[in-house]
Amino acid sequence: MKILVVNLFGKIAIDAGTRKVIIGLTLNQDELTFGELKKAVAKELPKIAPMIPYCYLAIDRQIEVRDNRYKIKPGAEITLIGQTAGG
Amino acid sequence: MIRQPEGALIQVEVHSGPLKKSEYKAPKGVGAKLIFTGIVRPDENEKPISALRYEMILPLANIQLGRLASEIAKKHGLKSVAVQHSEGIVPVGKPSFRLVLSATHRKNLFAAMQEFINEMKRFVAIAKHPIYIKPRLP
């Protein structure tokens, strides 16, 4: 079974009580869209589900993704970013 | 430091620990310079703290700060935007964030300052973790 390790960052990590969540892909799935990833994380961590629609994604710590149609390939370092707090 | 097509100078720096004194000089010919310094407060969520630990996703946070600085400079007609942010542990009373804006006239600087800080807090990949002071047992 292919898996995606999703790092959690910001308030969602605190509220979820974890900094990582593992999402399993189905046998025929080689990639996941950002929209599908958000649904999967919300299902895995219902505590933070209300915050998930407002999150964006960092790919390999340098690309910012907000488009739900973006296709995530296994192997990329992915971080789901919730409420931030700079300053 | 990057000079934007419109002529504004953009500078973004991430420092480990508290910020040192700023040596940033505004470009020649500006008529106004505005400096904001964020300092770690002694409490978070109404509980006493000893420090804040800042966590950033790098280089993304750097890219986002640079993009935001460019957008704000363009929108408000600024001559320069310099931003410094701490990563790691910053004790109470020490500076963790500095924003220096300059323009020909002062008019747009205050709105630009507010907008930059609000936007940074809203989306830039920076998290802060309070280090609480444990209450002493009687």
Image (spheres, coloured by chain):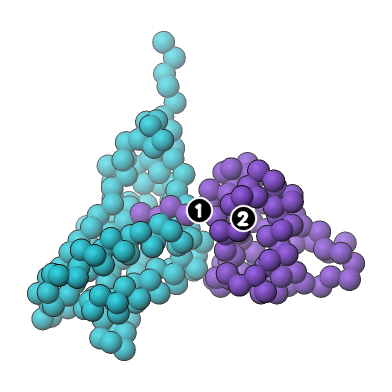
Chain colours: A purple, B cyan
Residue A44 drawn above or below residue A55: above
Q: Residue type at mark 1?
A: Gln
Please tell me which residue is depicted at 34% across the width and 42% down the height of the picture: B91
Which quadrant, please, contains the C terminus of chain A? bottom left
Give the secondary structure at mark 1. Answer: loop
Residues at circles 1 and 2 in contact by the CB criterion of under 8 Å: no
Q: Secondary structure at mark 2?
A: helix
Q: Chain of mark 2?
A: A
Residue found at the very far bottom of the displayed protein: B5
Q: Is residue B86 above or below residue B30?
A: above
The residue pinned by badge 2 equals A52
Q: Is residue B130 left or right of residue A35?
A: left
In the image, taking residue B51 as reference, residue B8 lies left or right, namely left
Q: Where in the figure is residue B67, as x and y percent of width and height?
A: 40, 74
Name the image quarter holding the N terminus of chain A: bottom right
Q: Nearer the viewer, residue B51 or B119?
A: B119
Which circle marks residue A41 in the picture? none
Q: Position of residue B137 (x, y in %)?
A: 44, 14
Name the kind of residue labelled 2 in the image: Ile
User: Nearer the observer, disc 1 or disc 2?
Assistant: 2
Q: Residues within 10 Å of mark 1 (few under 14, many from 20)?
A: many
> Can residue B90 be seen in the rendering of this structure?
yes
Q: Position of residue A26 (x, y in %)?
A: 87, 64
